[in-house]
Image (tube, rainbow, N blue to C red):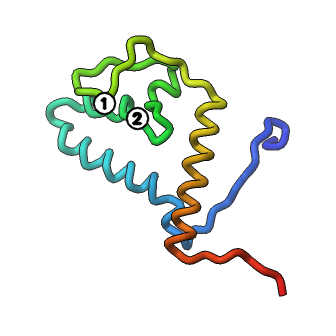
Amino acid sequence: MFLKHGFSIVTLSTKYSQTNGFIESMVKNFKKHFEKSIDQYPYLIMLILRTTSLENGYSPAELLMCLKLRTNSLMAKKSPMPKIPQADDIRRKELKYGVNQKKYYDKHHRVNPFSRN
């Protein structure tokens, strides 16, 4: 079924928590902010999280709906005309971000290339 639709399954080791570190920090951040705002404005915190830009420069709302959501909070940069994110641009930025992460991780942890004897 997965091959029919072009999906591939990649299993990650559960021994290495850094593989899930980004998601775990996002969940922790969401819970912290949501618990603070549950009495006053629970939907406002959801809107702010959806409009916060990711590393690729687009917010989750832009990636999902191809438009910018309006908020009362201050935004870092405003563009007069919202640009529709192109899938190729996003893939290129994500790949570049992943390559940089790998480079700095390998540099910090002194990973050497595998050599056969």
**Residue 111: % across, % down:** 61, 75
* Residue drawn at point x = 44 percent, y = 39 percent: 54
Q: Which residue is mark 1?
A: 76
* Residue drawn at point x = 22 percent, y = 21 percent: 72
Q: Nearer the viewer, residue 88 or 72?
A: 88
Relative side of 4 to 34, left or right: right
Task: Please tell me the numbered disc located at residue 30.
Answer: none
Q: Nearer the viewer, residue 92 or 72?
A: 92
Q: CA distance from mark 2 to mark 1?
A: 9 Å
Q: Which residue is mark 2?
A: 53
Looking at the image, the residue that sits furthest to the top is: 81
Instruction: For the residues labelled 2 and 1, say whether their Cβ atoms are less than 8 Å apart.
Output: yes
Q: Which element carries disc 1, helix, strand or loop?
A: loop
**Residue 84: % across, % down:** 54, 18
**Residue 14: % across, % down:** 57, 68
Q: Amino acid at mark 2?
A: Ser
Which quarter of the image is occupied by the C terminus?
bottom right
